[in-house]
């Protein structure tokens, strides 16, 4: 049986998983011992896997993570101050399905960004759209959007994203305009999406970073009361890496 026309049709229909699987079956005579249903099942499984991997790659690319971090690369030793069970729970989809948040607090260099990106990668693998932002850059984007008329479009896109990551949250104090913009982003996502906030600033000091106390209360109410909190401890990972580099290890 000539299969080249079938291969050409699979390629034209962009069924690349099935195409690769059929080529493999044609080259390996061991497949001749299988039934039609079994061979068809292998073709369908390969196409399904191909599409799942392609969608995952797209979600990860669109997330624009600052660091390529994986859950299995996390340091969950006692010196980090993290609850292993809690971190592993956050690698599962339940908290995002329930529209909850995560607050990661710790001194500079302790790995907050890496942890946030690892949780974001896990969210992508669980099928959720994800986007990473350094907070100051998001604020610049929102300011520019007011000028070029794309503000509502950006708000709509952010509202539909299942997980947002705000890194360096409240690194600087926010003026009235910035507070209103962020409150609108967070309010649009309330009971619709989840957000990770990675920050050096303890939650007890957040209120002082907002110019307007009333807006600060509204912001805190939407973030803090439905959030898991992770507090990172230990020495700066950047300093450790620098020492290892200097000593040649």
Image: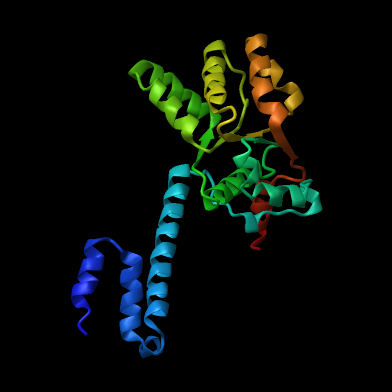
Task: Specify the quadrant that holds the C terminus.
Answer: bottom right
Could one spot residue 13 in this view of the protein?
yes
Instruction: Say whether residue 109 is left or right of residue 149.
Output: right
From the viewer's perspective, is residue 89 above or below residue 17? above
Please give the name of the residue rendered at 58% of the width and 27% of the height, measured from the top-left corner: 190
Please give the name of the residue rendered at 65% of the width and 53% of the height, measured from the top-left corner: 241
From the viewer's perspective, is residue 118 above or below residue 6? above
Query: Quadrant of the rendered structure where residue 216 is?
Result: top right
Instruction: Say whether residue 205 is left or right of residue 171.
Output: right
From the viewer's perspective, is residue 200 above or below residue 75? above
Q: Position of residue 245 (x, y in %)?
A: 63, 57
Q: Position of residue 42 (x, y in %)?
A: 41, 74
Task: Specify the quadrant that holds the N terminus.
Answer: bottom left
Query: Quadrant of the rendered structure where residue 111 is?
Result: top right
Q: Position of residue 57 (x, y in %)?
A: 44, 54
Q: Position of residue 226 (x, y in %)?
A: 70, 31
Toward the viewer: 13 or 69? 13
Toward the viewer: 29 or 146? 29
Could one spot residue 106 in this view of the protein?
no
The scheme the figure's colours follow is rainbow
Please give the name of the residue rendered at 74% of the width and 22% of the height, measured from the top-left corner: 205
Please give the name of the residue rendered at 40% of the width and 17% of the height, measured from the top-left corner: 146
- Exactly how many numbered labels are in the figure? 0
Toward the viewer: 59 or 96? 96
């Amino acid at each position: 049986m000539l299969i080249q026309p079938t291969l050409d049709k699979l390629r034209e229909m962009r069924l690349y998983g099935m195409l690769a699987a059929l080529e493999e079956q044609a080259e390996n005579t061991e497949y001749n011992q299988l039934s039609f249903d079994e061979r068809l099942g292998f073709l369908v499984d390969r196409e399904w896997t191909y599409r799942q991997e392609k969608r995952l790659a797209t979600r990860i690319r669109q997330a624009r993570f600052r660091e390529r971090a994986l859950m299995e690369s996390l340091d969950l030793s006692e010196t980090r101050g993290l609850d292993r069970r809690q971190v592993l729970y956050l690698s599962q989809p339940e908290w995002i399905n329930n529209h909850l948040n995560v607050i990661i607090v710790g001194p500079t260099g302790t790995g907050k960004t890496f942890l946030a990106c690892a949780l974001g990668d896990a969210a992508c693998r669980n099928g959720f759209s994800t986007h990473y932002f350094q907070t100051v850059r998001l604020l610049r984007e929102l300011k520019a959007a007011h000028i070029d008329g794309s503000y509502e479009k950006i708000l709509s896109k952010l509202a539909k994203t299942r997980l947002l990551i705000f890194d360096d949250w409240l690194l600087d104090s926010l003026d009235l305009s910035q507070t209103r913009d962020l409150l609108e982003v967070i309010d649009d996502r309330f009971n619709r999406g989840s957000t990770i906030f990675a920050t050096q600033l303890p939650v007890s000091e957040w209120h002082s970073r907002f110019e307007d106390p009333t807006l600060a209360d509204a912001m805190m109410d939407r973030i803090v009361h439905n959030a898991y909190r992770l507090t990172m401890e230990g020495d700066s990972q950047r300093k450790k890496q620098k020492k290892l580099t200097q000593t040649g290890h």
